[in-house]
């Protein structure tokens, strides 16, 4: 019986390890997603998760550009020289019921553009637009020339864009980029960073030891405020929230 339980434990451990390896291979740290062109008006980040990022325009009629660099994607930035191709899924949410005539975009993948895409609706006989609520398309890139392969992961940006300039904001339409995968020349998937935006596990609450009352402070002498407490509090909140510095894009 003990031997049987031991075998089950080993199988469970192996399965957990495989799951971990698989997840780390195809999950980028989407919590680091920022804006492009050094301009925060280029994108509004709605949410991030282990599988991807959801974003939209900051206002109707402009392009939306969400940016990551390869050092924020790759588990080992040195693997940048191994990257040969990549793919991901683009999902538009909320198009149903809108009069948007088309959406399209692509990705600036460090040294080249992706395949790109354009999505058009169906039309009723009276000319009204018909969209599904979720519209999905695949996009990809491939670096065919040695000169296209970047050498600096931190300087190699992936900018996921919608450039149709439709009215996405007023129609509550968002764009999701998910399931990003990068491959070497042999088709092997290259490991990516774990998502760092998830909330930390709640630590067990320990019963506090009784605190002796301190003598009343002498309030006759005023104390100059330094602002250090406020700064420390803000830094702590930012650390817990996993706030990331947003970096600029050069296209």
Image (tube, rainbow, N blue to C red):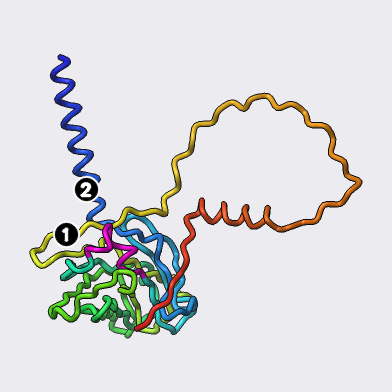
Q: Which residue is mark 2?
A: 21
**Is residue 165 toward the left or the right of residue 73 in the image?**
right
Q: Which residue is mark 1?
A: 189
Q: Position of residue 10 (x, y in %)?
A: 17, 29
Which quadrant holds residue 76?
bottom left
Quarter of the image where the C terminus is located: bottom left
- The Cα atoms of the two marked residues, 2 and 1, are separated by 11 Å
Q: Position of residue 169 (x, y in %)?
A: 46, 75
- Seen in the picture, residue 19 relative to 73 is either above or below; the reply is above
x 35%, y 54%: residue: 195
Closest to the observer, 212 or 89: 212
Q: Which mark is residue 22?
A: none
x 30%, y 73%: residue: 156
For the record, the magenta segment spans 68-79
Closest to the observer, 239 or 103: 239
Is disc 2 surrounded by few (<14), some (14 to 19) or many (20+) residues within 10 Å?
few
Q: Is-magenta flag for residue 74?
A: yes
Closest to the observer, 90 or 73: 73
């Amino acid at each position: 019986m003990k031997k049987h339980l031991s075998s089950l434990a080993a199988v469970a451990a192996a399965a957990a390890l495989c799951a971990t390896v698989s997840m780390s291979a195809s999950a980028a740290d989407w919590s680091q997603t920022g804006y492009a062109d050094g301009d925060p008006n280029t994108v509004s980040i709605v949410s991030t998760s282990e599988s991807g990022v959801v974003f939209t325009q900051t206002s109707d009629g402009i392009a939306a550009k969400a940016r990551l660099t390869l050092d924020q994607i790759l588990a080992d930035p040195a693997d940048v020289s191994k990257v040969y191709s990549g793919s991901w899924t683009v999902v538009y949410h909320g198009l149903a019921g809108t009069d948007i005539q088309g959406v399209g975009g692509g990705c600036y993948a460090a040294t080249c553009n992706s395949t790109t895409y354009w999505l058009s609706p169906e039309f009723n006989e009276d000319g009204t637009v018909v969209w599904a609520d979720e519209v999905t398309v695949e996009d990809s890139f491939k670096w065919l020339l040695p000169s296209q392969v970047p050498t600096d992961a931190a300087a190699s940006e992936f900018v996921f864009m919608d450039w149709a300039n439709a009215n996405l904001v007023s129609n509550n339409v968002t764009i999701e980029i998910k399931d990003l995968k990068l491959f070497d020349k042999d088709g092997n998937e290259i490991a990516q960073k774990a998502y760092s935006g998830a909330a930390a596990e709640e630590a067990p609450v320990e019963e506090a030891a009784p605190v002796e009352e301190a003598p009343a402070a002498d309030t006759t002498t005023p104390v100059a405020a330094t602002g250090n407490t406020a700064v420390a509090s803000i830094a702590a909140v930012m650390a817990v929230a996993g706030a990331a510095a947003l970096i600029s894009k050069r296209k």
